[in-house]
Image (spheres, coloured by chain):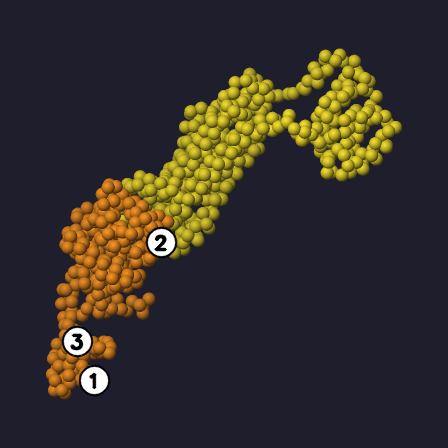
Chain colours: A yellow, B orange
Amino acid sequence: MKTKGWDKVFKFTYLQMLKSKAYKISTFIIVLVIALMMLGINFLPGLLSGSDTSGDETAKSAVFGIERVYISDQSGIYPPADFSFLSELEVEVNMISPDETAEITSKVNQSDQAEILIEITRDDSGINILTSRPESQELITSDDCQSFVNAFLKGSVWSAHILSLGVPEDLVSEAAVSVSSQVTIAGETPKNELAVIITSFIPIVSSLLLFMFIVLYAQFTASSIAMEKTSRVMETLLTSVRPMAVILGKVLGMGLASFTQFFILFATGFGVTAVVAPLGTLGEVFGSVETVSPDMQMVRNAFDEAFANFNAMTVVWIVVIFILGFLFFSLIAGLFGATVSRMEDLQSAMTPLSLFGAFGFLFAYYASIFSIGSDGINIMEKVSYYLPISSPFALPGAIISGQMNSLDALISVLVLTACNIVMLIFVSRVYETIILHTGNRVSLGAMFKLAKQK
Amino acid sequence: MALKVDNLVKRYGDFTAVKDLSFSIEKPGVFALLGGNGAGKTTTIRAILGMLSKESGTVTWKGRNLSVTDERIGYLAEERGLYAKYTIWEQMLYFAELKGMKKAEAEEAITFWLERLEAAEYTKKRAEQLSKGNQQKIQLAIALISDPELLILDEPLSGLDPVNSELFKSIIREQINKGKYIIMSSHQMATVEEFCEDIVIMRRSEVVLQGNLNKIKKGYGRVKLSVKADENILPLALECGLIVERQTPNQTDFKVTAQSEPEQFLKKTIESNITIVKYELREPTLHEIFVEKVGGETNEN
């Protein structure tokens, strides 16, 4: 395989890609979106929680806009539930007798104020809370009513019920403790549930990102080769270098451009996080803020657990898989790009690759989705790790989330490497013949025939 | 012997595009590769340069197999091609570096050739902003940038205005004087005749004529007679056995089949008191040789 001069093609392709308007604009958008996303994650929770205690409007929103409550307690719970705490939240509480219920019901129905009627009853099925709201939804919606009841009334009614059964007051909160269950492999520490959710989403997000950077740039490679061929630049190029040097330089140049953008994405994320984390939520999650609330400590622990397998070696694996994946798809894309003599034929020539890429991505993506909540690795995931069209999208997420050990990853990478070698041999046999072909697009069958002849 | 093409065969499936082609270029100067449309000239050039794989045959340059990656070869392709969106400077620098030139050396050469081709003002322009003729100048500059020993020019003057044609011709002359080996393919026979010493004429993938142009012409002998007269000379000419090949308002061209015919014709015109303005007994032009050798192709096609 004669590839002398590939380095010059590589350098030119890379620099021209970086200089192109499309690259600059897409990179700018990526930087902006990532920066805004990180800033949002960092500051929005603080802003929202901080705004809860300031101003009348926010106080209102804390009680879902409800200003007056009529409560008819027909449950027979004794001592009855105490709702006086609602007054502190600036909600007017009116306890009414069952006789007044009909009158209040019709009053609330026609009311133009944010008032509701609560009827607490008891039957064989348990304790029921019925909320009646005004006919007009402008002031209060059914959702507001339900949220209000869930947030403020249910707990009080339940506590009153427990107390009525003779449970001492100091044990009521103890009695309210929830019972959770988990299953683990014998001898293994049970996993943090939030960490399990985060771990499940890592392969989904990573496969999406890799699909974007691998398949999109592979299509750029095809387009670039087709452009050189159709604009007759290729003939001038071939007086200095061999066709394989052109495709190799082009594939690697585009690969580096893609990787550069991929790197910029992460660098922006890490950079913005490093700068703003001490001032907000990201610092609480990732540890730059030392003292955090118990809830935030739980999130921090979950992230620590989810990314426990992420280290320098993981980065090396991701880089290797990215290169191999890009090489695999770009070699095919370059070959398809060389089959056309007119730019308008490129899209139809690229259809098989687009289908391959989409299938590989969707296979990896749905394998990750179907694994959420399941125990261990399902068969679809396992296949996606070794199938060359899906493994570039599936492997990085699996390695980061610790679903794959180094040996399995190595085997998978070796399979992908072998496929790349086969693809390189195929391309080298066919590419030199079709690169100056003019006329109708070279079919897949004709390419296989050519490869066989050579 | 500088360039030697030996028994070159190139096939596309069942179709043979170049059939057993052999020729050599022994000394610097212009070598013409001629033929009608579809005769196989461009395929031959591509096969010589290794852009296309060949079924059999060898191409050697100074005794070694010709490799574009090892030699400095300049090529002006028939179908011009530049990167539309890149600046002239960027792409010339790229092509120069692909030829193995260092950046400083390349920049010096680019500046020289752009000035020589009167295109220095286009340095920062994108190719798509240039006219066809100016794009052709850039293409020629790219072909010459590495100071190649072997220069291949496929239809170098097509589409150029007379001023730029003269500019291109003067550059070709300079290259000849510098001792460069040039292969020229063109349909403009007058231009080819102006520069070439040796020719190959191809017809339907095969060589139909090859050798030194002067010798070929001498081989034909003085078989063409061009006459301009004030009176009608056709009856006398036909009486002498001359065959009319072409008649224009300026002159009549005859084909001579026997040495006695033109002498007899001249004698009769004098006897008839006809005023002869032009009487030229000459060898055939390259154009005439080409038409004779390739002429049937169009009809056959």
Toward the front, the furthest residue is: A55
Query: Which quadrant holds the N terminus of chain A?
Result: top left
Above or below for A398 versus B251: above
Kind of residue at disc 3: Leu
Q: Which mark is residue B91?
A: none
Q: Is residue A407 left or right of residue A187?
A: left
Q: Earlier in the sequence, mark 3 or mark 2?
A: 2
Q: Is residue A401 visible?
A: yes
Q: Nearer the viewer, mark 1 or mark 2?
A: 2
Q: Earlier in the sequence, mark 1 or mark 3?
A: 3
* Image coords of residue A259 (percent x, y): 41, 35
- Residue with the mark numbered 1: B232
Q: Chain of mark 2?
A: B
Asked whether the residues under marks 3 and 2 belong to the same chain, the reply is yes
- Residue with the mark numbered 2: B129
Q: Chain of mark 1?
A: B
Contact? badges 1 and 2 (CB < 8 Å): no
Image point 33% across, 40% down: which residue?
A11
Q: Is residue A326 visible?
A: no
The answer to which of A404 and A302 lies nearer the viewer is: A302
Kind of residue at disc 2: Gln
The answer to which of B205 and A3 lies nearer the viewer is: A3
Q: Which mark is residue B225?
A: 3
Q: Nearer the viewer, mark 1 or mark 3?
A: 1
* Image coords of residue B276 (percent x, y): 15, 81
Toward the right, the furthest residue is: A99
SS state under label 1? loop
Kind of residue at disc 1: Asn
Q: Is residue B153 left or right of residue A164?
A: left
Badge 1 crowding class, 10 Å Cα cut-off, few under 14, some 14 to 19, many 20 or more, is few
